[in-house]
Every structure is written in structure tokens, then in C-alpha cells.
Image (spheres, rainbow, N blue to C red):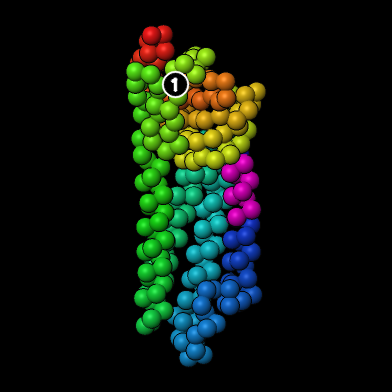
Amino acid sequence: MQLAFLMIFIVAFLFIFAYLILVKQYYGLISGYWNKSEEEKKRLYELGYPQKMGKIILNSGIILLVGVILVFLGVAYAVEISLVIMLIYTFAHLLIANKLETGKDRKRNFYILIGSIVVLVGIFAVFLIPTNVKFHEDYLEVTGLYGVEWSYDDIHTIDKTDELPLIQVRTNGMSVLERRLGHYRLEGLGGGRLFIQSGEGPYIFIMTDQEYLFLNAKNPEETEAWFAELERAWAE
């Protein structure tokens, strides 16, 4: 829900930005526009370049607003999905609008857009690195992003639950759709780690004197297998 409120702020910012460009014609808000020659600005204006940029901003805000509304209607992960759709729409239309540029500006903007796309794709690719659990002779290893190794001797509680405590805040982690990776603060437990692959239980709960974690696999059967293997390794 905190993400939804952040999106509301972003939506308001985008709408104000679009209003200033489309209605007030403050084209100086468009990056690099006022650095162009008067002849180039006139050419771009006649081609509708500033209006296209304003509409891209406006439509991006509308896409995010739909996602926020769906969240408050109870649709899970609506903000995350709308954010992905917005990014695809924005980059695609910016690439189209960039064709109206000429010379160095066109080439520079193209490289900037492609570079931004590569960075975002890289971030998502890193997040898609799978989480796995390995049961070594003396310690448990959770692999992937925010991975951890815990000695069996340090673990004093293992359990299985069908429900997660309420997530209060993400302190250092990543959330996309049903995946929750990293450090979170949960109601009644304080700070700990989540390695959640699915929003469906069961979840494995492990606690040491200093920290706890919840984890599960993409399907309940694999989670059950992890729990059985953890019980066996911990008991030895």
C-alpha cells in the first residue's frame, strides 16, 4: 500500500508536468528544447514534438493512476503491473518521438533511451535470479539475491505456516509481483529476511538469536520438500 501512495505522488507530478506543457506551453520543461536554435524549435513545434512529449507524460500518468485505483479496489500487484506497462509505453513512444529530432540530438537521445532500457532490463534480470535452498552438512544456504548462510547450531526455531505476518515496511529489499526478497519489518517480529517466491503458503519460518527469515518456493510441493529436508538436517 505504501507503493500505491508513492505512485499517487508520481501521478500528480506527471499530471502537473503535462498540464504545464500542453496547456501553458512551457516547452522549456522538455529536456534540451530551449537549447535548440529558433529555427529548430519552430520546426519541432510544427511537427507537434512538444505536444507529443506532453501527451506521453499525460498518458504515463493515466496508466499509473489506473494501477493505483485497481489497488484500492483490491486487485493484487496492480501498481507493479501498471508501472511495467507505463515504462514500456513511455520508452516506446519516446523512441518514436525521437525520430523528429535531427543530427546529434537525435543520436544522443537514442543512445540515452537505449541505455536506460538496458539498465532497467538488467535490474529486472538480476531480480529474476532464482532463490534456492541448499542443505550442507553444517549449515543452511539460501542462494540468490540477499542470500544467507546459517549454521544449524545457530538455529533454535523452525516452523511452517500458511500465513505471513503483516509486512510493515521493506527496509532493504526488492518486491515484484509475488516475489519478496531482502530485509523487511514484519508485525510482531521486527526486522528479518524474506525469500518469498509465491504469495501462496505454506511458508518456512527459521529463527536464530539474532534474526529470522521466511521462505517458500514457487509451488507448495517444493516448499514441503524443503521443510522436510530442513527438519532432517537440523536434527542431525
Q: Is residue 38 left or right of residue 23?
A: left
- How many residues crowd around disc 1 within 10 Å: few (fewer than 14), some, or many (20 or more)? some
Q: Is residue 234 above or below residue 58?
A: above
Residue 236 seen in render: yes
Tally the numbered discs: 1
Q: Position of residue 60 (x, y in %)?
A: 51, 58
Q: Is residue 161 above or below residue 16?
A: above
Prevailing secondary structure class for the magenta stretch in the rendered image:
helix
Asked whether 180 or 6 is in front, the reply is 180
In-front residue for pair 80/205:
205
Give the amino acid type for the residue marked by disc 1 in the picture.
Answer: Ser
For the N terminus, the image quarter is top right
Q: In this figure, which residue is indicated by the disc labeled 1?
A: 151
The span picked out in magenta is 2-11
Q: Residue at x 63, y 28 (%)?
A: 190
Relative to 45, say whether 115 is above or below: above
Seen at 40% across and 22% down, the residue is 140
Regarding residue 101, the answer to whether it shows in the image is no
- Name the residue located 58 percent from the left edge and 44 percent from the top edge: 3
In the current view of this chain or complex, which residue is farthest to the bottom? Answer: 39
Helix, strand or loop at label 1? It is strand
